[in-house]
Amino acid sequence: MKEYHVTVRRSGPDGADSRLQEYTVSFPDGEIVSVLNVLEAIYREQDPTLAFFDHAACRQAACGKCMVRVDGAVKLACKEPAHETMLLEPYNSARVVRDLLCRS
């Protein structure tokens, strides 16, 4: 199993009450894992309060709604490969709905 150590900037609307929260998730060795896969695992297995964009139509790198800041760079969560250690933040701190979910 491969472990991913993730720090997520959590907050309320427009970045209010910002704080960092840490998670660790595991995936089988050799499995191709995206940032979105990691977020889904956190939501499903550890914290169903985590807010991020997830939709059946996502995973095609077309709509751009799953954008997050990964280690300081804006990326599409559905396309970006997960790193063993990551800091995930909203792509636009002025437009935060909650956690990683931003208004478009």
Image (spheres, rainbow, N blue to C red):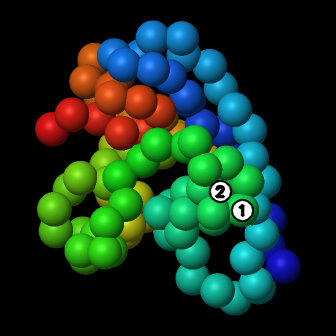
For the residues labelled 1 and 2, the Cα–Cα distance comes to 5 Å
Pinpoint residue 76: horizontal percent, then vertical percent.
Answer: 33, 57
- For image coordinates 43% across by 38% down, the residue present is 100
Observer able to see residue 72? no
Residue that mark 1 sits on:
45
- For image coordinates 31% across by 66% down, the residue present is 55
- For image coordinates 54% across by 16% down, the residue present is 18
Pinpoint residue 25: horizontal percent, then vertical percent.
Answer: 75, 61
- For image coordinates 76% across by 84% down, the residue present is 28
Pinpoint residue 4: horizontal percent, then vertical percent.
Answer: 73, 60
Q: Residue furthest top?
A: 16
Q: Amino acid at mark 1?
A: Glu
Q: Foreground residue, 39 or 32?
A: 39
Observer able to see residue 34? yes
Q: Foreground residue, 65 or 80?
A: 65
Badge 1, how many Cα within 10 Å: few under 14, some, many 20+?
Answer: few
Left or right relative to 26: residue 53: left
- Tell me the SS state at disc 1: helix
Whether residue 16 is situated above or below residue 88 in the rendered picture: above
Q: Amino acid at mark 2?
A: Ile
Mark 1–mark 2 CB contact (< 8 Å) = yes
Left or right relative to 98: residue 62: left
Left or right relative to 35: residue 104: left
Whether residue 14 is situated above or below residue 8 in the rendered picture: above
- Tell me the SS state at disc 2: helix
Q: Quadrant of the C terminus?
A: top left
Q: Which of the numbered marks, if any, corresponds to residue 42?
A: 2
Left or right relative to 45: residue 36: left
Q: Which of the numbered marks, if any, corresponds to residue 13?
A: none
